[in-house]
Image: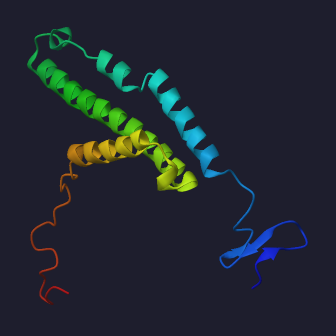
Amino acid sequence: MSSGASGDGSQSTPFGKNFAKAAETLGNFKGRLDEILSNLEKSPASQKAMGDLKIDAATYGSLPSAAHVAEAYDKVHSRLTEMSKSLGMLIEGMGISAMIADRGYDHVDAKYAERLRAIQKQLKSDYRPPADTHQTPPGVGQGKHGAT
């Protein structure tokens, strides 16, 4: 397989024809990520907007089931707020990573590198492994023929 341009204007690479197409640069990609982040921050899904949606438990009434609804709402609201914050940080981190990949680590302002480290540290700190909700019922895989 040859590398270089073919007669139809497409490029051939060791990874296959048209792999190295003239697509967006990493800088353009970062710009798109910045735009997505900006739109998120202005949307009803922003961390601030999610925080403002808190509903007082008394609003649900005094029935016992109302307390359960209020508790469930608070739990979901809290998780959605956390997810919105994490999504914003992930998008920002991807944008910084794209800039570093485009310019090289040595050609990026130190504040961006530090921000990326802070995002990574925060996301790692906030990470909660999913609960193991899938449990094997008793006796499964332990039949007469033995487990495989």
Count numbered badges in the picture: 0
In terms of image quadrants, where is residue 52?
Answer: top left
Closest to the observer, 14 or 99: 99
Closest to the observer, 66 or 23: 23
| Residue lying at 19% horizontally and 54% vertically, measured from the top left | 133
In terms of image quadrants, where is residue 14?
Answer: bottom right
Residue furthest bottom as drawn: 145
Expressed as whole percent of the image width and height from the top left, the position of residue 120 reads 31, 48
Is 93 positioned to the left or the right of 81 in the image? right
Determine whether 82 is above or below 143 in the image: above
Expressed as whole percent of the image width and height from the top left, the position of residue 91 reads 45, 41
Determine whether 65 is above or below 95 in the image: above
Closest to the observer, 145 or 127: 127
| Residue lying at 23% horizontally and 43% vertically, measured from the top left | 126
Is 50 positioned to the left or the right of 59 in the image? right
| Residue lying at 21% horizontally and 53% vertically, measured from the top left | 129
Determine whether 100 is above or below 56 in the image: below
